[in-house]
Every structure is written in C-alpha cells, then in structure tokens.
Image: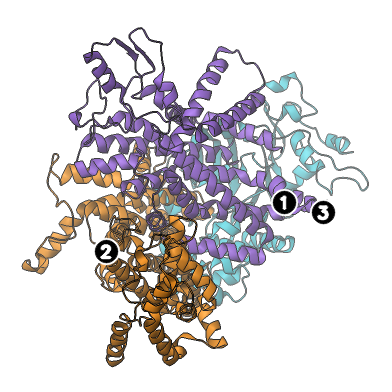
Amino acid sequence: MSSARYSDLVWHQFKKYTLAYRSLQMLVALLLLAVFAPLLASDKPLLWRVSNGPWESPWFWSLFDRNVYEGTLDIVFNVMLVLGVPSFFLFFVGAVREPPVRTLRVLLVLFGILLLFTLFHHPSHAKISYPDLEKIMIAEGQEVTSVYPLLPFGFQSVDLSNVRSPISWAHPLGTDNAGRDVCTRMIYGTRISMTVGLFSVALYMVIGTILGALAGYYGGRVDALILRLIEVMLSIPSLFLILAMAAFVEKRSIFHVMLIIAAVLWTTPARLVRGEFMRLRSMEFVVAAVASGFGKRHIMFREMLPNALGPVLVTATFGVASSILIESTVSFLGLGDITVPSWGQILNTGRSTGMWTLILAPGIAIFITVSLLNLVGEGLRDAMDPKLRQ
Amino acid sequence: MWAYIARRLLTMPPTLFFISLIIFGVLNLAPGRPGESAQISGAGESKRSSAQRESFRIFKEQFHLDKPIILNTRMFLTADDVEKKLVDAHGWGDVHDIKRRIRARNMLEDAGEYLVGPLIALLDHPDPRLVSASIEQLIEASQRQIKPDGDRLLNQTAQRGNEERKSWRCTATIPAPAVIHTKDVIPAKAGIQSCTSAVAQWKTWFLDNANHYTWSALEKTRRVFFDTRFSYYWRNLLHLDFGKSTVDRSDVFDVVLSKLKYSISLSLISMLLAYLIAVPLGIYSAVRQGSVGEHLSTLALFVLYSLPTFFTGTVLLRLLSEGDPLAWFPTGGFESQDPHRLTTLASMRDVMWHLVLPVATYTSVTLAALSRYARSGIIDVIRSDYVRTARAKGLGEWTVIIKHAGRNGMIPLLTLLGGLLPVLLSGSVVIEVVFNIPGMGLYLYEAINNRDYNAVMAVLVAASFLTLVGVLISDISYAIADPRISLE
Amino acid sequence: MKLLEIHDLKTHFFTDAGILPSVDGISFEINQGEILGVVGESGCGKSVTAMSILRIIPEPPGRIVAGRILFDGHDLVSMPIEALRKIRGRDIAMIFQEPMTSLNPVYTVGEQLREVLSLHLGLDDDAARARIVEMFSLVGISEPAMRVDAYPHQMSGGMKQRVMIAMALCCSPRLLIADEPTTALDVTVQAQILNLLVKLRDERGLGVMLITHDLGVVAETCDRVVVMYAGRVVETACVQDLFAHPSHPYTVGLLQSLPDAAKPGSRLQTIPGNVPSPLNFPTGCRFRDRCSRASSACSLEPPLHVVGDGHEVRCHHPYQGGEHEHAIA
C-alpha cells in the first residue's frame, strides 16, 4: 500500500461524506475571506485622484505599510493577497498550464522574496484617514475621485461621532463603542483565528510528533521520560497554564499566544504518535528497514512517520478547532494580543458594553468555524477508518 | 485495593514535583519578571524614585525574587566584576546603553550580601566616585533582612545597625551616585578625603562582621545550590507555604483553599448533572438509532460541542439576568450580598438561584464532551456478543440494556472522569469570570491581572493536585466497575 | 418427532449499500434427540438462520421478511416478543462462536447463570447456586464450586465455552443451537465439547442444531446434515448418505476439499472462485458461476430432487449414485 494511493483512497472516501466535504469547502472560503479582507474592507481608497492629477492607489501601497497594518500577520496575509489574486486569476483563466507543483514552487519563492522585502521595508505612510481627507479637500473646493472597497473602514479606525450605531447599509453589523465598524473587524478577525488555528497546530504537531516518535521508537528511558512529561502536562489544567504563561509575557503579540498554545497542547499528538510508533516498531517493514542498515532518522521519519500520519492529521483538524477556541477564550479574558481585532476580543467588548451585535457576531463566527472544523475532522476520521470504508 | 491506592498515592509526590517544576519554569523563565509590575507604576525604570526602588527591593527579597533561579554563583564575584557593574549602573562607561544600565542595577540590587566583600575591597579604589558608589551600595547590601517572625531583640539590633550604617557616607561634596551623569571628574584628592572617615567606619565594621560575609568552601557549595529561588521555592512548597499575596499580603494558600468550595461545588454539580443527562441520552440514542429523536439529540449535542463557553455564558447572562429582555436571575456572584440575614433554607435557595445560569453553562460544555463518549460506548456494547447472549437467555429488553449494556458502556465514562476534571477546572475561569463567582478561576484571573506571582503559583499547584486526585478517583472507580482491571 | 420446523425463512439486511438477502427461503426441520449439522462456507447464512430462530438478529438493519419457524406448533416469527422471551433460554438455548466475548466481562459467571435460572425456573440464590455447581460438573468444569465466583477473564477459552454450554443447558432446553461452538478452541477441547453434545443428546433427547464449516465435526457428531450455500439450502441428507452419495456439486466440492478425501500424494481440490456477495447473487442457481456442471438451465431456479430417503437436493444437474467418485478421482 503506497502512501500516495492511500491518501487518494482517503480523499476519495472523504468526498463521499457530503457534509464534511461541504464543510471543507466552506473553510477554504473562510480562508479566502481572510486573505481577501483588504479588498472587502479598508479605509484606503482603491483608486484616488485629486483634480486632474494622476490616478493613485493608496490601498495597494497600504498593504505593505506598517503604519496601517501594525502586525506582521496582516502583512503576510496581504502578500498572499497580492500574489494570490493574480495567480488565482491565471489559474482561473487557464493561462497557466504548467504542472501545479512547479507553479507552486515559483509562487512560494516569489512569496518569500516579497515577504522579506515588505518586512524589512518601511514605506512609512503617514496615518491618513482618506475619508476625512476627502471631505476636507472637497470642502476646499478640490475635485476628488475615489473608489473604496465595499466597507470603507479600517479595523482600527475609530469614529467617535458614530458610536454604537445600529445595523445599517453602511455598517452591516453596526459600530462598536469606539465607532469602529464591527463587520470590518469581524473580517479581519478571520485572519487571526485562521492563523492561530493553523500556525499553533502546525507548531505543536511538529513538537508532539518528534517527541512522540522518539518515545515510541526508542522506548525504555527516553519513553519513560517523555511519557512522564506528558502525564505531568496533562495534570495541569491547560487553560490555567496558558493564561498564566500569557500573563507573564510583556507586550503579548498574537505570536506569543500561538507559541503558548503550542507549548501546552503538544501532548495530544505526542501520545498518539508514541502509540503509533510502538505499534509500527514491530512491523515487518520497519524491522526490514533496520535490518537493511538504514539510519535511525531515515527509519523514523521516512519509513514510520508516513504510516503514523493519518491519525495525526485527524487530531490536527480537531486541534485547529480547539486552538481557535483557546485563543478566543484568552482574548475574551483580555489576556491576548489587545491590538488585533480577534473575535474573542470583540466578544469581550460585547460583554462589557452589552451590545448584542458584538456578542452574537463573534460568537456565531467562532461557533461556525469550530463546527466546520469538527465536521471535517469527523469526516476525515471516518474516511481513514478502514472498517467504515466500503 | 488499599495497596493499589497506597501505591498510587506514592506516585503522586513525584508527579507533583514535576508539575511544580514546570510551573516554576514557566513563571520564572518567561520574559518579563514576575512581580516587577507590582511596583512599577506606569513610570519607567529610570524615573523610579529611590523610595520606590527600596520598597521594590524589599518586595523582591521577601519573595526571593532577588535570588538566582537555579544556581547561585554570586559568592564568586570579584572586586573587578563589581567595579564593572558599578560603572555600568551609573552610566560612567563609554556606552550609554540604558538596558545595560538597568541590568547592572538590578544585578547589584539583587546580589545583596554577596557584594559586601568585593565592595570593601573597592573602598581603596583611586576614583572617588567609585568609592562613593561602593559605599552607597554597601549601605544597601549590608541591610539585614527583618523577617516578621524573627527574633524581636535581634531584629531591633539589626534595625539599629541598619539605621546607623546609613550615615556612614562620604560628606556632601560628592554628588549622589544615583544622579551622576556627567563625565566631569571631581578633583581626586577632595573626593577621597571626603570619604576617608566613612571608609574607615566601613572597614572597622567589616572586621567585626566578616564572618557574616565570608564563607567556607562547604558553605559556598551549599549556597550555590540552596541559596536560589528554586530551592526556596521548594522549601516553601514542602511546608505548603505558597507565600503571601503581593496584592493584599494574605496567605495565598488559605485564600485558594477558601475559594475551592465555590469552584468544586460548581463543577461537581455540573458534572453530576451532565452524567445524569448524558447517560440516559446515550442509551436512548444508542437504542433508537436512526430515529428522529436520535438525530435531533445528536445535532443538539454537536451544537453544544462547538459553542464556546464564554459565548453561551454571555448570551445567557444577557438574555436572562441583565434584563435584555429578561431579568429572572441575579447578574452574578455566588450568593446575595448579605446572606447572614437569611435563614438556612432561604440562603440555600439563594445560592441555588445564583447558580442556575453558571451551572447551565457549565453543564452544557461537560455534557457535550460526555455524551459523545456515552453514546459511542453504549453503541459498541449494544452490538457486543454478550448483549446478544443476554437476549438469547430470554432476559427482558430493559434488563439487557441496563444490566448488561449499561454497566459496560459506562466504564469508558469513568475513565473520562479523570480527564474531564482538568477540562472542568479550565472552564471554571471563564464561567467564574463571566458570572462573577468568587472561586478559584476568578482568583487566578485576578491574580494574573495583578501579576500576583504567589497566587498564580498556588492556584496552579492546587488545580493540578485536584486533577491528580480526580484521576486517582476515576482510576479506582474504573477498577471497581471493571473486574478485568486488577488492582494488584 | 419434529421439534422445530423452518418453512421458507427469509431474513434480509437493509443496508445503505442495498438489501442483503442473507437467508433467502430456507426450510428444514430438527427432530428430537437429533444433532442436525448445518454446513457451508462463511457468509452463507448459517448464523443468521440460527439468530433468526430466536429473533436476535441486529434490528435494524436485519429483519425476518417471510417464513415460519414452528416450535411445538407455535410460530416463533409471529409470536409476541414477550412470549418468545419465555422460550429463549428455557426451551431453546444458544451457544455462540466466540466464547471469549460472549460472556459479560463485568459479572461473575455464576451471576450470569443465576440470572437465567431465576428468570425461567424462579430459583432462589441457594438453589440456583446448587444447580450451577451441578451444571458445571456436568459440562466438565473442574472445581465447579470455586468457579462460580470467577470472572470470565479468569478462565480459559475452553472453560468459557463450557460455561456457555452450562448456561445454555441449565434450564434443560429441548433444542440447543450451537453456532460453531468449537471453532475458536483447541482441537482437544473441541473433541471434549463435541462428545459432551453427543452425550447430552443420548441421555436427554436433546435436539441440537450444530452450525459448523468443519465436515470432520459433522461426520463425527451429526445425524443429519443441511448444506447451505448463499442463503439457500442446497442439500439435506442423513450423514451417511451425504458422505457416501453427495449429490449437489457444491457438497461434492466441499468433500473434495477435505484433506482426508484426497488420496495421499494427490493435490487437495478447492472450489474455484468465492462465495458471491449477497448484494449480487446470481439468478437461478447461486452456485452456477463456480460449478463445473453448470448449463444454461442453471439460470432458472433449480428444482428439488428427492434422491433418497430423506435426501433432498436442489440442483439441475445433481450427481447420481456413485457418480461423484469419478469427480473425486
């Protein structure tokens, strides 16, 4: 049973679970929403012209501007947007007929270059509020032509003249107690949740898999030590530990939160991989690989790991859901990154102000995301279960 | 059975040891020193007034935060090392690196008694500024700690000595070291002269007190390992002394114990409720597979499973007690403001009334987790061969399900009990914060916001201990329910 | 005297993939004091037949869609379930294939027997205990008094199967359904248990429906044999007739694949192909795809031939007397 064929088999089976498959599609849509956030909501005009001056796009340049997007996270997403939109378009039109692997590689390199460029480049735009600027200029009698995204708001742009406004066409979810557009913040919040989910899970899957693999492969003392560590980690209520760790980090960024989540949750994949490795250790193909004199690293990560990866993938899916839940809990308690519009943060504002839009919008968003992930995880688990496969 | 429990109890201390080790590591190695913000009030480090610095130093001493974390090598400091640090601390070096200055200052402040020897040696330094700075440092380093529970008489002597030594300074001509920023060199002779009497006083004092500040090789080795934060931490843990709260100086362990009753009653009630609902529901959906009711309950549980606790709690609170639209339940707390006025019965009713929403929220979370296992456990059992045997024996359907499927199906739920406890405790933070219940979770939350190091520590250790006990209980009940598990 | 008569029984399973006609119109009867062997490859519907008699097939997906099962002249299929429960365990008892998992692991074996005794015979605890010890020694459990309080996991597989037999026999049933009772056991234990069944038949006039795929077992213990294939009965005969003059090509195939049937030095014969999936049984004779004698006629339902006294075969081209010898040779 070759690995590629096995994954095809699982994929084929997965597609049969309509609910799970649709959920996966919706998750992809959510991810696209995160990438395309600035196209939907930004207070920088897509196109801008004063009198008969040249056409400009403050929006485009703001994508790489650390004065607009303070967090690295947003910049990364923006680079994905800049690269993703054209390549998506090219795929769509069918202009690119190259084998996708190569295209992906080219894209990845481009992505890296662009990212490095933006991270070390500070095109320090002044913090201009274009809508305000436009009003002033029009009042001064200048002719301004501008095209804004659907929601002409930034996720941090405070408008104290428009506080707690109800749901309207201009503000689909109203504004919060500082006059910020809730819908905009929700859209940008997708970025936080998606990143926290994917990144922290990727991180702790790696930690857990390596430790679990070592424990399962070597057994004996290594195993006893790692197992003890796992046992100890499991006896500390995880949210307590996460909160305590978060509390002692000064100037928490969203990356700190991810690291902390990863540092606490690695035990699940570790236990799993350990069990799988112990099972695989006595299997013929591993014994054969040992007998043929392959190195330990080769055996562990080339021979055994691919066979243990299935259950790891399933827990990873559920892990993304629980990481998102944990991040929003931490933010809800005010111990997360207070500069980003995380869903938990918005809900916290909702709780303190009692505004229903601020409670329901993030709550339902979290619920839907977590549900979708759980559905996908269940579908994946069933798809991998040979007992259920026809 | 008893041997098993005893053996399990014996394995608990090492596990607790490791747990405390991890908690200690987390609290000490995380960037940002615990406790620091308790004294820094918005103003930056450099602007801190000397009175504030002094109180911060005492605070650090009290909580052993001035000690090195694992190994103490401070008794090996030489006069040269200390000189460099003094230069850095006063910004006399070429580098005006503020971070380096703060580091050096903190180091000098923390090293305390270990500085005395090297500082006395520095009194002969030709640079009057250094001599003056050394003297100032000596005043601080030679302060004898005054413990509240120490010998009173000794304390008074020590106190008098501390006060007396504060006057052994260079005469006023030399600017106070704390404000020296200039590179203008004060005429060497005048400087040295203004200090001579103070230097003499210090040297005499040192001759009398040298035994306090020089250590034998054995003593040095002992101190390397034991005069550390880690070691003090352990000594305190063994005495179940988690120290005092840095907020209100109360004994954190007592506080945690007093908070436990709220958290435990809350989580026990919800756990009980969750089991009471989950088990029949599990049996129902296993027996009536494919029915409309089964689909509905599966859907409901799935929804519950994905709903975040804080969302459910906030919505319930808003809907049913904050008057939007209803105000049936109290908006928070465990009991009414003045419970003593009520009779026992009325106060019980009062508490129950307060607990409706938190328990409902709590139960919904637990229930969702539990039901999945209850259902799949019972489904597995209902398809098992021995249930078929029971039917073939002519037993009634209820006997088959309750006696033969029920007990077996419940076994996985018992193991879950142990795993559920940390989840429940974790959930308590959110629930207690949302509903303002003065339990362990809320205490942790407040301690975290106040950077109350000792309190956080005590809560974490207590919660882990509770978890261990929970796991033990669930293992024992598991072993009782399933005769295949031997308790040998 | 006829103890149990099955007429045209059909038990189907309604799954997502389609309807599985696992038992599709079978008829046979069991007489008092007779061991009836039911043989066939796995998946041919033997166990489903057995479970249909006591109506303990997993429902859903399974359901008895047609047929009658007469026990003492009462139809078990249409009988209310409460009445059937009084028959289960008391008049008709069953032993399952897997002694390892057929006993409830959380109760002592004594408790599991006591339950039946108090249910059907109304015995109190002391009487039940005495009866259990008696039953245990009957089925050859050593130290029976001590074993009463043992848990299943403290016993060996053979011991557990004896407990199962003791449980089945403790209310003195008239019919015992034994679904591959010895498959999971060692050969020596197997022989002991089979001897026990024979003894019980001889001493108590017990009727036994012995399901097995092992023709050796059939030859040693059974009086009559029903051969099943793909949910149908293909041949019924007394045991001597069956071995001497097998008529159905499938029976012949089964006999040929017995090691003792093959001449020393010759290759062991096998039946080509596999049992067809219940989802797509062939029309007409379900064996025709694997049959060397098949003709176009076989796509029609095969007729029932009476080839001897109580020897019936359902085939278009049955082997006539002695003909099979050539096939084997």
Residue at left offset 31%, top offset 83%: B162
What is the secondary structure assignment of the residue under circle 1? helix
Check disc 3: other Cα within 10 Å, few if <14, some if 14-19, many if 20+. few
Q: Which chain is purple?
A: A
| Residue at the limit of the structure toward the left, as seen here | B341
**Residue C189 at x, y = what percent?**
70, 63
Give the quarter of the figure containing the C terminus of chain A: top right
- On the image, the x and y values in percent for residue B336 come to 12, 60
Q: Residue at x 56, y 54 (%)?
A: A270
Q: Nearer the viewer, residue B469 or B426?
A: B426
* Spatial CA span between label 3 and label 2: 58 Å
Are the residues flagged by discs 1 and 2 in contact, CB closer than 8 Å?
no
Q: Amino acid at mark 1?
A: Arg
Q: Amino acid at mark 3?
A: Ala
Residue shown at the point (34%, 75%) measured from the top left: B62
Q: Say whether disc 1 or disc 3 marks the residue closer to the N-terminus.
A: 3
Task: Say whether residue B81 is left or right of residue B292.
Answer: right
- Which residue, given by chain and number where applicable, does mark 2 sit on? B265
Front one among A368 and B343: A368
Q: Colour of chain C?
A: cyan
Q: Quadrant of residue A183?
A: top left
